[in-house]
Image: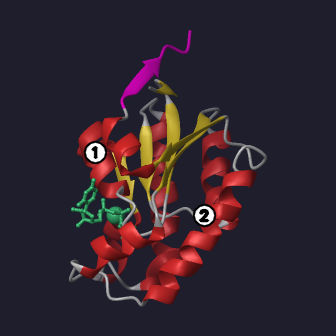
Amino acid sequence: MIDVPELALVALVGISGSGKSTFARSHFLPTQVLSSDYFRGLVADDENDQAASAEAFDVLHYVAGKRLAAGRLTVVDATNLQPHARAGLVKVAREHDVLPVAIVLDVPEALAWERTQGRPDRTFGRQVLTRMHRDLRRSLGSLAREGFRKVHVLRGADEIASAEIRYEKLF
Ligand code: CTP
Ligand code: MG
């Protein structure tokens, strides 16, 4: 059971192919989920244009802030493997007195690679995934220190598939 405050900024954390978007679709409303791919598409007409990431996250943070100001649970579907990417989310959450929560999807690199190879929209090489996996391992030790109030780590496909969200009342 994953306890999530009913108002929170939820950061999904996981390598490409770990199942973040799938998880988001099965547990949250489409409008609660802000995905980096979607925002890259909005600003650059191409969900894979990595050069558009800075602009895309700028807009994503802006929308997240508007949602949190209105008291709406917000989920960020991005890899969130870099400390600076997570710092941006913690900052937006703090600015709105909302708890930042991390849900880590930790799957074997080989499984993620297998899934990725079947996707026309993911064309990077194996080394990219290996680097992401290394970044994930590093992230695991630092999330709490970075300001995430709860860090839920789901290990393996089975644990991810059977996870359930339980909302905690704030008052
Ligand atoms: N998938 C699967 N079984 C799961 C979860 C995902 O077969 N339990 C498949 C999805 O259908 C998709 C691929 O694995 O084809 C990647 O899943 P996705 O949720 O898109 O992974 P993300 O972590 O969102 O990947 P990315 O960071 O590249 O967006
Ligand atoms: Mg995705």
The residue under label 2 is which amino acid type? Leu
- Determine if the magenta segment contains residue 167: yes
Answer with left or right where residue 113 lies relative to residue 107.
left
**Quadrant placement of the C terminus:** top right
Label 2, on which residue?
136
* Callout 1 secondary element: helix
- Front-most of 112 and 79? 112
Mark count? 2
Residue 91 visible from this viewpoint: yes
Residue 28 visible from this viewpoint: no
- Determine if the magenta segment contains residue 31: no
- Front-most of 47 and 108? 108
Gap between marks 2 and 1, in whole Å? 27 Å
Tell whether label 1 touches label 2 (CB within 8 Å). no
Residue 2: image x %, image y %? Answer: 47, 29
Q: Which residues are magenta?
A: 164-171
Label 1, on which residue?
31
The residue under label 1 is which amino acid type? Thr
Q: Which one is closest to the eye, mark 2 or mark 1?
A: 2
Residue 7: image x %, image y %? Answer: 49, 28
Quadrant field for ligand 2: bottom left
Residue 91 in the image: above or below residue 39: above
Residue 132: image x %, image y %? Answer: 55, 74
Residue 53: image x %, image y %? Answer: 48, 77
Classify 10 Å Cα crowding around label 1: few (below 14), some (14-19), many (20 and above). few
Mark 2 or mark 1: which comes first in sequence?
1
**Quadrant placement of the N terminus:** top left
Residue 66 in the image: above or below residue 59: above
